[in-house]
């Protein structure tokens, strides 16, 4: 029986992709994920995540990643449809992996509704949707590590040319980068989410 875990990374970021990842693993091997130290990616250091990423992809039967670009995110936000965009990407990776059952981390306040939407889109196995699933189910924790490492690598790639920081609004380095870019160019780069409130605020300020 193939069990799938699905999670995302980067939903709240000001820049870069939203990354959705899924893993499938035979039910008999799930305990091994716990034994190697897999847990919610937020509770792990970057070094630990990188190490576990390599171990996870060797252990699981398969995995899949899907990315939503800032442009796609902005379009979804404009239509108040960000949850649906995430559901589409989760359905995409589930459909690719064809598991018997999938555990997903719900971004919707109504976890059951979110699960039903993914089931409608993927038409693949049973969908079990929960809040904080990345802390409750080790298969989702494994997916969270894959998503986070993939996202971190995308940000590291941007950071080679620009001082983007972590990409999150709570990071002064990220906010300052967007401010400096806008001040100089009167716009923001394609990898910045124009629909995000902090970005809109920067763009609304009078130029010096």
Image (cartoon, rainbow, N blue to C red):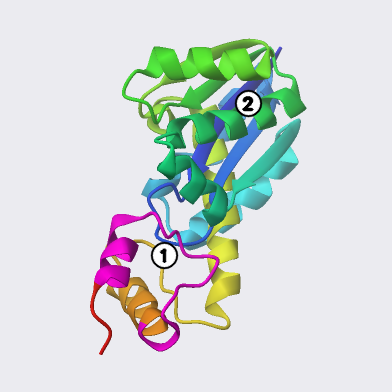
Seen in the picture, residue 31 relative to 62 is either above or below; the reply is above
Residue labelled with disc 1: 167
Q: Is residue 128 visible?
A: no
Pointer 1 local density, CA inside 10 Å: few below 14, some 14–19, many at least 20:
many
Residue at screen point 57% across, 37% down: 143
Residue labelled with disc 2: 91
Instruction: Say what secondary structure mark 2 lies in.
Output: helix
Instruction: Please tell me whether residue 193 belongs to the stretch shown in magenta.
Output: yes
Q: Nearer the viewer, residue 22 or 53?
A: 22
Question: Which residue sits furthest top?
Answer: 126
Which residues are drawn in magenta? 183-204
Instruction: Please tell me whether residue 9 belongs to the stretch shown in magenta.
Output: no
Residue at screen point 76% across, 28% down: 96
Instruction: Say what secondary structure mark 1 lies in.
Output: loop
What distance separates the C-alpha of mark 2 from that of mark 1?
A: 26 Å
Q: Nearer the viewer, residue 194 or 103?
A: 194
Residue at screen point 53% across, 61% down: 152
């Amino acid at each position: 029986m193939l069990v799938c875990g699905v999670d995302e990374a980067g939903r709240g970021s000001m820049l870069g992709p939203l990354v959705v990842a899924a893993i499938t693993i035979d039910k008999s091997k799930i305990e091994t994920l716990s034994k190697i130290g897999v847990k919610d990616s937020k509770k792990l250091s970057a070094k630990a995540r990188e190490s576990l990423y390599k171990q996870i992809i060797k252990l699981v039967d398969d995995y899949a990643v899907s990315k939503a670009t800032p442009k796609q995110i902005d379009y979804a936000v404009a239509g108040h449809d960000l949850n649906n965009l995430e559901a589409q990407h989760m359905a995409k990776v589930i459909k690719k992996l064809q598991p018997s059952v999938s555990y997903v981390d719900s971004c919707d306040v109504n976890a059951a509704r979110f699960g039903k939407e993914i089931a409608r889109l993927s038409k693949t196995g049973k969908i079990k949707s929960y809040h904080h699933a990345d802390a409750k189910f080790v298969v989702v924790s494994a997916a969270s590590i894959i998503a986070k490492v993939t996202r971190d690598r995308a940000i590291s790639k941007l950071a080679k040319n620009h001082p983007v920081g972590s990409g999150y609004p709570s990071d002064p380095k990220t906010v300052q980068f967007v401010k400096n870019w806008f001040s100089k160019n009167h716009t923001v780069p394609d990898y910045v989410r124009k629909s995000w409130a902090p970005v809109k605020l920067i763009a609304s300020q009078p130029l010096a």
